Amino acid sequence: MIKIALIRHGKTYGNTFGRYIGVTDEPLCEEGIQQLSNRTMDTVELVFVSPMTRCIQSAQLLYPYARRIQIPEFRECNFGDFENKNYQELQTNPEYQKWVDSMATLAFPNGESPEAFKRRCVDGFDKMVDTCIRRHYKNVACVVHGGTIMSIMEQYGMPARDYYGWQVANGCGYHICISERNWKMGRREAFMESEIRLELPE
């Protein structure tokens, strides 16, 4: 079995306002740094990470000892014209209303389509698991984006949920297990072992 921790990066300035932060390469904000600092995580052999600054910083804070491998496919979605804006700023935008009415299935104007984004994330995950099997890694972490985690878990997560059923807060995620034997046979379910929660002081 391969144990994988899927963790969303810490909070950024845009996250505090509920903005669509995709290709904007924001660093962690001070609150995000504090949330992840001095947090005790399980020891892993390797960390796979999105190339975005917020994910690299989060990996450094959570796994300072671990070697990191960047996976370009793990980047967050390109939100196009909606990038760096939130619902309040977009609610009078007719293109945004069309997107909402489509149940979030339309491509983002001048951005990426949800299906292309999901397929990209899953392709990156497939390559990552194949690497783990080939190099005999048994316990790894992925520090990525919320949308990346949702895409992977919608495809492979058990018990099954839809994309939005796998939403996670900053610094949170899932521990999943994958059977190498089943993966090689094309049965690629990822069984959730536990949720990763961010315990904050009262």
Image (cartoon, grey):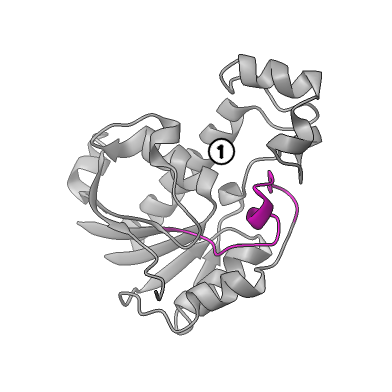
The image quarter containing residue 50 is bottom right
Quarter of the picture holding the C terminus: bottom left
- Residue drawn at the location 38% of the way across and 29% of the way down: 162
- Check disc 1: other Cα within 10 Å, few if <14, some if 14-19, many if 20+: many
Instruction: Evaluate whether residue 67 shows in this view.
Output: no
- Residue drawn at the location 51% of the way across and 58% of the way down: 170
Q: Is residue 79 left or right of residue 180?
A: right
- Residue drawn at the location 44% of the way across and 49% of the way down: 168
Q: Say which element carries label 1.
A: helix
Q: In this orientation, which residue lies closer to the viewer: 202 or 154?
A: 202
The image quarter containing residue 57 is bottom right
Badge 1 is on which residue? 120
Q: In this orientation, which residue lies closer to the viewer: 69 or 100?
A: 100
Q: Is residue 50 magenta?
A: no
Q: Measured from the top left, where is residue 128 in percent x and y?
A: 43, 53
Q: Measured from the top left, where is residue 1 in percent x and y?
A: 19, 56
Instruction: Evaluate whether residue 45 shows in this view.
Output: yes
Determine the main secondary structure of the stretch shown in magenta: loop
Q: Is residue 17 magenta?
A: yes
Q: Amino acid at mark 1?
A: Arg
Q: Measured from the top left, where is residue 175 in percent x and y?
A: 29, 57
Q: Which residues are magenta?
A: 7-24
The image quarter containing residue 195 is bottom left
Q: Measured from the top left, where is residue 79 in percent x and y?
A: 71, 37
Q: In this orientation, which residue lies closer to the viewer: 200 or 113?
A: 200
Q: Does 147 sit above or below residue 98?
A: below
Q: Does 201 sit above or below residue 183?
A: below
Q: Is residue 170 left or right of residue 21?
A: left
